[in-house]
Amino acid sequence: MFNKIYSKVKEFIHDEWKFILFVLLLCFLYLYPVDCYVTVGGGIFSAADRVTVEGGQKEKGSFNLSYVSQLKGTLGTYLLSYIIPSYEREDVDDYRYNDSESVDDIELRNELLLKDASNNAIYVAYTNANKEITLLKNDLYVYNIAQKAVTDLEIGDKILKVNGKKVDDVDKIIDSLDEIEINEVVSIEVLSDGKKVTKTATAYGDKNKVYLGFSVMASQEYKTKPSVEYKFKEQEYGPSGGLMTALEIYNQLTKKDLTGGKKIAGTGTISRDGVVGEIDGIKYKLSGAV
């Protein structure tokens, strides 16, 4: 039996070696990483496809999120960017906060930014619609590590305790710096890849200011009445959908249909106090909206 299979495989390789070589070359081109992103265009999708309020009103029009389509940099996409005019290369360094960050770090931060934008959109919409919203918990995630930092913390780590004291607010971490001396090794308990582990950060700075070398992002979880559900896809990330998501939630919560029966496209970050901020990739988002 084995000899039969071996003979057939050998015969196939002998007859189809050119095809096999071509397939292997394609795999190499599209799997070998290159330190860039390739932007290939933009588009829109309805915010109602990503967020649903229980018993929310039906809209005659729609709020749509403008987005940018981006491919990971591989040898294949990199070479295609020289052939296809609409493919535009972007240096990964433009997305790094420091030189040591990997592409995985960048993408994990973008996932945290999407979560932050979604939470802000919920808070802004429910408070402005005068609907019931209660803060259940406030988690802190590492989203940036300074170049000077001496630490084994990683982007995406959820901070639980600093020097044995529970922290669930950014101010508590800031306050703890008053008790920490320069060159002190600080114990930090985190949830990393689903496991509780203890990591460290060595304090640095001067007599006026002490740093631990990492920044945290607060991620709130709310209980709302009526309830709200998000359904973003795995490949969707970043904060620039915050404005349109907030408008969609607000529109589903209130009686007046803000769309006026029109198809509306937009983009913009949103803070917890409702301030709309900057976004990237505007030319692609505009062309996608058109």
Image (spheres, grey):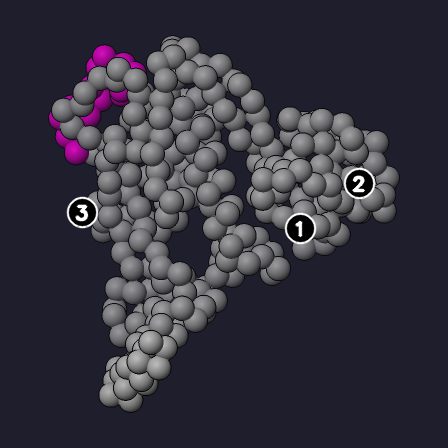
Q: Which residue occupies 67% across, 32% down? A: 160
Give the residues drawn in magenta, as a range: 251-263
- Left or right: where 178 falls relative to 235: right
Height in image: 90 above or below 151?
below
Q: Nearer the viewer, mark 2 or mark 3?
A: 2
Q: Which residue occupies 59% across, 47% down? A: 155
Q: Nearer the viewer, mark 1 or mark 2?
A: 2
Q: Which residue occupies 71% across, 46% down? A: 213
Q: Position of residue 278 (x, y in %)?
A: 42, 41
Single out the residue that lies furthest toward the bottom: 14
Nearer the N terminus, badge 1 or badge 3? 1
* Residue annotated with mark 1: 146
Q: Is residue 79 magenta?
A: no
Give the label on residue 290, or none. 3
- In the rendered structure, which amino acid carries the disc numbered 1? Ala
Q: Is residue 252 magenta?
A: yes
Q: Mark 1 and 2 residues: CB-CB less than 8 Å, in contact?
A: no
- Calculate the distance from the C-alpha at mark 1 to the C-alpha at mark 2: 16 Å
Q: Which residue occupies 22% across, 17% down? A: 57
Q: Position of residue 35 (x, y in %)?
A: 48, 67
Q: Mark 1 and 3 residues: CB-CB less than 8 Å, in contact?
A: no
Under circle 1, the secondary element is loop
For the N terminus, give its image quadrant: bottom left
Q: Quadrant of residue 217?
A: top right
Q: Position of residue 137 (x, y in %)?
A: 56, 22
